Image (tube, rainbow, N blue to C red):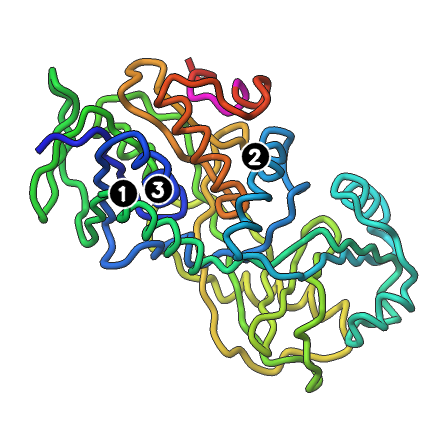
Amino acid sequence: MTRDFLIIGGGIAGVAAAAELSRLGAVTLLETEPVLAHHASSRSAALFEPSYGLPPVVALSHASGPALKAAGVLSPRGLMIVARADQRAAFVTETEGMGLAEITTEAAIARVPVLNPETLAFAALADHAWDIDTDRLIQTYARDARSRGAEIVTAAPVTAITRTDAGWHVVTPKGDYTATRLVNAAGPWADQVAGMAGVRPKGFTPYRRSMARIPAPGGHDPALWPMIFGAGESWYAKPDAGALIVSPAEEHAMTPHDAWPDDMVLAEGLARYEEMVTEPVTRLLASWAGLRTFAPDRVLVIGPDVGDPTLLWSAGQGGYGFQTAPAAAALLAALADGRAPDLDPAAVAALSATRFA
């Protein structure tokens, strides 16, 4: 049976696309792993901060806010940036860019008691940041897609892609699939999928981002603490079910693979975190890493390929996949349907795959 859309990739980009495209026709989604959202989508910091990123990303994030709230996947978190005395320039740039209000160091310590008064010189705070229940959002999209007849096939790595007169023929160990249009939502593997399909790759680069989960520092309950960024995004920490997730916020270019953390990079990031708090890190509860994949201009790539419009891109989500998912999927569906997108035309152009012509 020939489907209308065949989606490769079962992360947040692919599953959101399945939910929206299933309104237009028959959808099959193919995921390499045994479960959806195995790679970057299961390793996200899971924060909705709509002012984070370049202007086209911010446009998608703001447009996604109402849908994320309606889905019931947001809960209050807040965002704080902290800085040493020598980090004033980076602190000002980031607080102004994301709309945070500077607060006294005393107020910051009152909010997060483990901050170190000897190293903390500047702090800023905003309430416009929310935790995202990423698992619930993935499952909501999958359920919506299936309710409209979409087929979701896991443990189905793509081994061959052929362009035919009727569309696309894709081979997997689970069987062969055909569709009129192909959607490349393969995350770090998006350029590899493009190469298999005979379409020019876009130059995506996956970057590793590591995480460590540590016990709540000093016996405090961090549940009401904001997410905390070191100035220059040199590290960040986020409450997580009674513990704290700390990341060195590194960006190390990688080839696509199932990522794992580098112990030295984690140690260096934890040292930067420890410099700003009074409680040392004595042990890790867990550690992991994911790949954040960016186009050369660090803006998502959404829509028909310039060389073959029957191949649609939804790739290059970087660190913004969950917070842009509703608007990104809606944009993809509008372009697939030949409708004018709700998004500002300048943002649509900036996100278009045709910019790589």
Residue 187 image point, x, y percent? 37, 42
Q: CA distance from mark 1 to mark 3?
A: 8 Å
Three-letter code, disc 3: Ala
Classify mark 2: residues with Cα within 10 Å, few (<14), some (14-19) or many (20+). many
Q: Which residue is mark 2?
A: 60
Q: Nearer the viewer, residue 307 or 297?
A: 307
Q: Which residue is mark 3?
A: 19
Image: magenta residue range: 349-353
Nearer the camera: disc 3 or disc 2 = 3
Would you say the magenta stretch is mainly helix, strand or loop? helix
SS label for mark 1: loop
Secondary structure beneath disc 2? helix
Q: What's the distance in space between the residues labelled 1 and 2, CA to CA?
A: 25 Å
Badge 3 element: helix
Question: Quick check: 136 above or below 157?
Answer: below
Whichever of labels 1 and 3 marks the residue nearer the N terminus, that label is 3
* Residue 122 magenta: no
Type of amino acid at the residue the image marks with label 2: Leu
In the image, is residue 216 above or below residue 23? below
N-term mark: 3 or 2: 3
